Image (cartoon, rainbow, N blue to C red):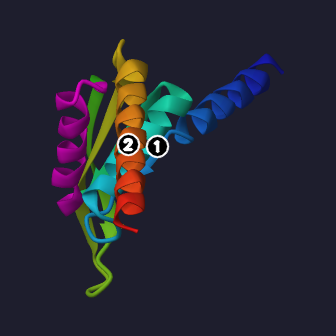
Amino acid sequence: MDEITEGLNNINIADAHKKNRIQVSNTKKPLFFYVNLAKRYMQQHGEVELSALGMAIATVVTIAEILKNNGLAVEKKIMTSTVDMKDESRGRPIQKAKIEILLGKTENFDELMAAAAEEREAAAAAAAAEGEDQS
């Protein structure tokens, strides 16, 4: 019985971990959609897992580097593997490269996000004031 309980606990941990996963495609959304989504996930969960297959791997690496270079994220773990898939056009099995990058918040993540929000508010206020001046 203890084994079943332990198995259920492991499933719950795995499910909780998936809530902060972003599966990146290089055709569906623009790059900064994923950058901003990753920021939101880090605010909510403290970390984010970026995942991609094949040609989208370069996009995931770019997203991770943008977050790291802006001082928002630190690399916790990088995992690579190959995944067996079926080629849609030919119907035969193929292998695709897969990458998973786990990023965590930096110590000053919250300060940087607050400063960025203040800058946006100030820019919006300036734009609103400029609009009033013209009328």
Instruction: Give neighbour class at mark 1: few <14, some 14-19, many 20+ (Cα, 10 Å).
Output: some
Residue 133 lies in the magenta stretch: no
Dot 2 alpha-carbon crowd within 10 angstroms: few under 14, some 14 to 19, many 20 or more: few
Locate residue 37, reporting x and y percent. 42, 47
Residue pointed to by mark 2: 120
Percent position (x, y) of residue 80?
24, 40
**With 23 as the anchor, is 79 left or right in this view?**
left
| Magenta residues, start to end | 54-73
The answer to whether marks 1 and 2 mark residues whose Cβ atoms lie closer than 8 Å is no
Three-letter code, disc 2: Arg
Three-letter code, disc 1: Arg
Q: Residue at x 34, y 70 (%)?
A: 28
Q: Residue at x 24, y 48 (%)?
A: 60
Query: Which residue is the extreme one toward the top?
Result: 107
Residue 135 appears in the rendering: yes
Residue 90 or residue 99, whichever sits in front: 99
Q: Circle 2 sits in a helix, a strand or a loop, which is it? A: helix
Q: Is residue 67 magenta?
A: yes
Q: Which mark is residue 90?
A: none
In the rendered image, residue 93, in percent from the top left (x then y), is placed at: 29, 71
Q: Residue at x 43, y 27 (%)?
A: 114
Mark in front: 1 vs 2: 2
List the residue tagged with mark 1. Answer: 21
Q: Nearer the N terminus, badge 1 or badge 2? A: 1
Q: Main secondary structure of the magenta part?
A: helix
